Image (tube, rainbow, N blue to C red):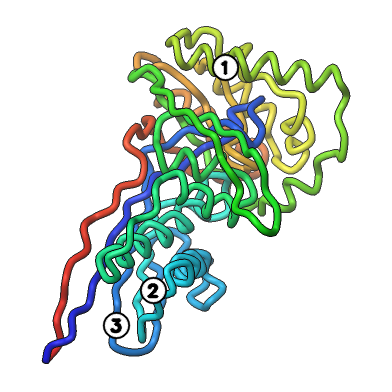
Amino acid sequence: MAEIYLSATAKIPASTTNLGPGFDVLGIGLSLYSQVILEEKASETKIICLGKDSEKIPITPDNIAYQAVMKIFDHFDYHPPGIQLTINNGIPAIRGLGGSGTAILGGLLTANLICHKRLGTESLSNSEILSFATEFEGHPDNVAASLFGGVVVSAMEHSNKDRLPSIKSIKLLPPSDLRLIIAIPDFTLPTQKARNILPNSVNFSDAVFNIGRSSLLVAALATGNLDLLATAMQDQLHQPYRAKLIPGFNEVIEAAMSAGALSVALSGAGPTMIAYARSSSNTNEISEKMAYAFKNNGLSSQTQILCVDTNGAEVGSPSIKSSR
């Protein structure tokens, strides 16, 4: 009798987070994607990584997408004899664009769909998927933006050893003419290193400063008042410290603004820097000037002009293969 094997595919957008003042709570989905394919196999497990920076992604059980798959399989008490996990990576690794978050979501979403079809169980909701993903990441901003798309505001209610974190999130759709120009310098910056440089406490006045800016930023994006971004994206909590890790930080900001950008910020923990502009702006000039500023500081870089992804993660219905 033929054995039936299922497979599922997920396409997940990259994300940029913090957006200046919204440390660990604000994120935007980007039109830059990775794909995760999960297939049941008769025996053995294989992890395949293809695409951008694939040599930096482990193909061992340390792979974060594989760990996410196993988390869902354990949750549903499903133990297939073997799987093949293929990651087609389109997102530069360790650059502040949410690559680990897309891998986590890809593993969670494909495993969730296969368990639903294989076992007949009720699928985990997006809210539950977000909680699992946040447990891996430690903060919801990247995974929420990649899961839902658009601009996402997230708050974590609780997180302890006995319970999954509970995340409250709201998705907003920014103006359709918003463009995001990313400049990716040719070095990696692990998130932990970028977090370690931050102080253990901040001044009360700096906290108030960021509350005001992040509130204004959400309102500006929700109402389409993009002229407020220059003020709304100012930050006192993390970028002044992380700037020390990125040669040319201030020069890149000045170059982009002089070319017509509305605002510039670190993407996540960096080192990628991201300029915000209207589609009617000279986005190519902004891109070129950002790259030139990095070059003047001894760094080559890659630039791309992106849109906001408003769809979020997409999961394909599982295909069925048989063996005889």
Marker count (numbered): 3
Give residue 41's mark. Answer: 3
Label 2 sits on what residue type? Answer: Ile
The reply to whether residue 302 is visible in this rendering is yes
Crowding at dot 3, Cα within 10 Å, few <14 / some 14-19 / many 20+, comes out as: many
Compare marks 3 and 2 and give the one earlier in the sequence. Answer: 3
User: Which residue is under mark 1?
Assistant: 217
Along the viewing direction, whichever of 222 and 34 lies nearer the viewer? 222
Q: Residue at x 84, y 17 (%)?
A: 205
Label 1 sits on what residue type? Answer: Leu
Compare marks 3 and 1 and give the one earlier in the sequence. Answer: 3
Q: Residue at x 35, y 18 (%)?
A: 177
Rendering quarter of residue 244: top right
Instruction: Pinpoint residue 21: horizontal percent, then vertical percent.
Output: 66, 25
Rendering quarter of residue 199: top right
Asked if the residue at tag 2 contacts the one at tag 3, i.e. Cβ–Cβ closer than 8 Å, the answer is no
Asked if the residue at tag 1 contacts the one at tag 2, i.e. Cβ–Cβ closer than 8 Å, the answer is no
Instruction: Pinpoint residue 56: horizontal percent, then vertical percent.
Output: 53, 66
Q: Is residue 212 left or right of residue 185?
A: right
**Does residue 149 sit above or below 176 in this rendering?**
below
The Cα–Cα distance between marks 3 and 2, rounded to whole angstroms, is 14 Å
Give residue 15's mark. Answer: none
Provide the secondary structure element on which disc 1 rests.
helix
User: Which residue is under mark 2?
Assistant: 48
Label 3 sits on what residue type? Answer: Lys
